[in-house]
Image (cartoon, grey):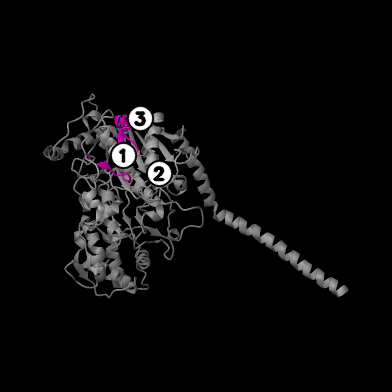
Amino acid sequence: MKALGSKFSFYAGFVVGTFALYLFLRQLWYERAATASSSNYDKIHDYQLHLEQDRKVWKKDRSALFNLEHPHHTGEDSRMADELYKKVRILCWVMTGPNNLEKKTRHVKATWSRHCNVVVFMSSVDDPDFPTVGLGTKEGRDQLYWKTIRAFHYVYEHHRHEADWFLKADDDTYVIVDNLRWVLSNHTPEEPIYFGRRFKPYTKQGYMSGGAGYVLSKEALKRYVEGFKSKTCTHTTSVEDLAMGQCMEKVGVLAGDSRDTALRETFHPFVPEQHLTSKFPKSFWYWSYCYYPISEGPNCCSDISVSFHYVDSSLMYLLEYYTYHLRAFGYKYRYNPPISSVYKGVLEAPPAPAMDQQDQVRDLAQDQKPVQEAEEAHVEGH
Amino acid sequence: MTSPKNLQSRTVHARETWAKRCDVTLYMSSTETAFPTVALNVSEGRENLYWKTIRAFQYIHDKHLDQADWFFKADDDTFVVVENLHLILSSFNPEEPYYLGRRFSPFVKQGYMSGGAGYVLSKEALRRFVKGFETGECTHFSSIEDMALGKCMETMKVPVVDTRDVLGRHTFHPFPLDKYVIRKPPGPQAWHMIYDHYPVIEGPDCCSDYAVSFHYIRPVQMYMLQYMTYHLRPFAYKYRF
C-alpha cells in the first residue's frame, strides 16, 4: 500500500512538473514569437493607418465612393491632370457580384478606381460596407445585360449631376482613368457619343467591347434611359456589349473612334503582354471583330492606353506601379499627345471637327509645340 | 552573361529591348557566334559561372577598359532600365573603387551584390578585380559567382554602395516585381527577402520609380516591360524628379 502510494505520488509529481515546465516554456516561446513578429503588429498598425487615410480620400455616400482629392504622388507636377480631373468628371461603375468582392473587386477599389471622380460597384446584392449597389437581379452570364440596364438607370437617377461621362468596366478590367480623360477632352458631354474598343459585326456602326470597358457621354446616357422609357430599346440579348451597341444605334448615339492621333488603339480587350507579343491565329475571332485594322507588336497599343481586360488581382497592382511609377529618368517620350485647346486655358471653343488621316499625320509632326509649352510650364512650376 | 542554348530563346529578346541602350554591349558565352558573342575559355554549367565571370571581366579589362567608365554585369533574364542606371552612377567618380547593386548581407562582411539583379563595377574596381587574380589575393574559391565576387571586392578594398533612392526604395531587384509589390499576409519573412541587407518594404514602397533592374524576366515580359517603361504613362503628369 505504501509502495503504491509513493509510486503514485512520484508519477503525479512528474506530471505536475512537466505541466508546469510546459506552461513556463510556452510563455517563453510566446514572448520570443511576439518580439520576432513585432513587425506583424506594425503591419496591423499600418493597415489601420491606411484605413484612416482612406477615409480622408474617399467619402462613402449613397452606396457610391466620392473621390475627395485627386490622388497625387510627391514629386509630381499634376496641375494639368488636376484641371482635367475637375473639367472631365468621370463616374466609373464596376460590374461585379457578391462572390468576387474579396477576390477581385477590392483590388479594383485599391488601385485604378481611385482615379475616378465617383465609383459605384454594381452587384446583385446590396452591401453597405463595401459599398455595392444591389440591382435586384441574379448572378450569371445571362443576367449581364439586365445588370447593365439597371446599372445605367441607377446611375442616371442618382448621379447624373455628379459626372459628365459614365464608364462601365468589369472587375477584371484595368482602366487608366487619366488617359481616358485625354480621349474625352476632345469632346463635350452634350454630344451623343460613346467610346470603347470598337467591334464591327452585327451592327451598322459597330459596338464597344464590354470587357475592355466603354464610356457614355451624359447625352448618350440620357438617350439610353429615354430609349427604354419609349420602348425603342429593350432587352434584346444577354450579350451585354452587343445589346448596348444596338440600343445606342437606335437612339442616335455615335460610336466614337477612341484611337490616339497616331491611330493606335487605347481600349484593349486583353492583357498588355498578349497585345504586345502574341500572334493571334488568323482563325481567332478577334481578327474579324475589330472595326479598325489590327496592329500586332509594339504598335498595337497607344502610349496613352486606357484599358486592359482579363487583368487578375496581382496584375492590377503591377499595372498601377508600371503606369504611375516606373519610368526612365530623363527619357523624352517620342509621342506627345496634343492637348485640347479647351484645357490650355483658352475660353470654351466648339469641338474640333473630325480630322482626316492627312491632318492627323501633320498634327503629329507638329508635336514640338506641346512639348515646348509643357517644358515652359514645368520651368514655371519649378 | 549567356550561353549558346539561350541565344535565340532569351538573349535575342534582351538585345532587341534594353541591351541596345548601353554604350557598349557584350554577350559573354562559351563559344563565339555571329550573334555576336564573345568566346570565354570556359564550358557551360552552373559550376562554371564564376569562371565565366572572371574570364569575362579579364576580357573586358584587356579589350574594352577605355571604352567605358562603368562595367555592368547582367543575366540574359534580367531586364534593365539603362537610363536609371545612369542616374545612380552619375553621382560617383569611376576612378574611385565602387561596387553597386542589390546588397545581400550573409557570407561576406561588407555584403555582396546579387548576381541576378545585376551589379556594377567602377573602372578602378575592375582594375582591382583583375589585379587581385594576378597577385593571387582573389581566387576561385566557390562557384557562387555573386558571393565570390563580393568577397574579392572586400579583399581588394572596394566599398559597397547603397543604391536605394532618396525615399529608401530599392532600385535593383533580384526577382520580378510581383514578389515585392503584392503584399503578403503577416507571417515570417518571405524566403526571397532573407538575404537583403536593407529592409524590404512590401507594397507600393518596395520599388523606386527609377528602378534599374528586374530578374527572372521571361522573354515576352521583356517587351511588356519595355512598353511599360518607355511608353505607357498617365496623361498630364509632369514628374519633377
Give the residues drawn in magenta, as a range.
A205-234
Q: Residue at x 54, y 54 (%)?
A: A37
Q: Work out whether B117 lies above or below B168.
A: below
The disc label shown at residue A244, or none: 1
The answer to which of A2 and A358 lies nearer the viewer is: A358
**Gap in Å between the C-alphas at discs 2 and 3?**
20 Å
Q: Position of residue B90 (x, y in %)?
A: 27, 50
Determine the chain carrying the residue at label 1. A
Q: Residue at x 66, y 61 (%)?
A: A25
The disc label shown at residue A229, or none: 3
Q: Secondary structure at mark 1?
A: helix
Is residue A265 left or right of A313 when viewed as pictured?
A: left
Q: What residue is shown with label 2?
A: A143
Q: Residue at x 68, y 62 (%)?
A: A22
**Which quarter of the picture shows residue A273?**
bottom left
Q: Amino acid at mark 3?
A: Lys
Q: Quadrant of the C terminus of chain B?
A: top left
Instruction: Say if the magenta span includes residue A217.
Output: yes
Q: Are marks 3 and 1 in contact (CB under 8 Å)?
A: no
- Residue A71 seen in the current view: no
**Which quarter of the picture shows residue A335?**
top left
The answer to which of B222 and A16 lies nearer the viewer is: B222
Determine the chain carrying the residue at label 2. A
Q: Earlier in the sequence, mark 1 or mark 2?
A: 2
Q: Position of residue B154 (x, y in %)?
A: 37, 64
**Gap in Å between the C-alphas at discs 1 and 2?**
14 Å
Q: Are marks 2 and 3 in contact (CB under 8 Å)?
A: no
Q: Earlier in the sequence, mark 3 or mark 1?
A: 3
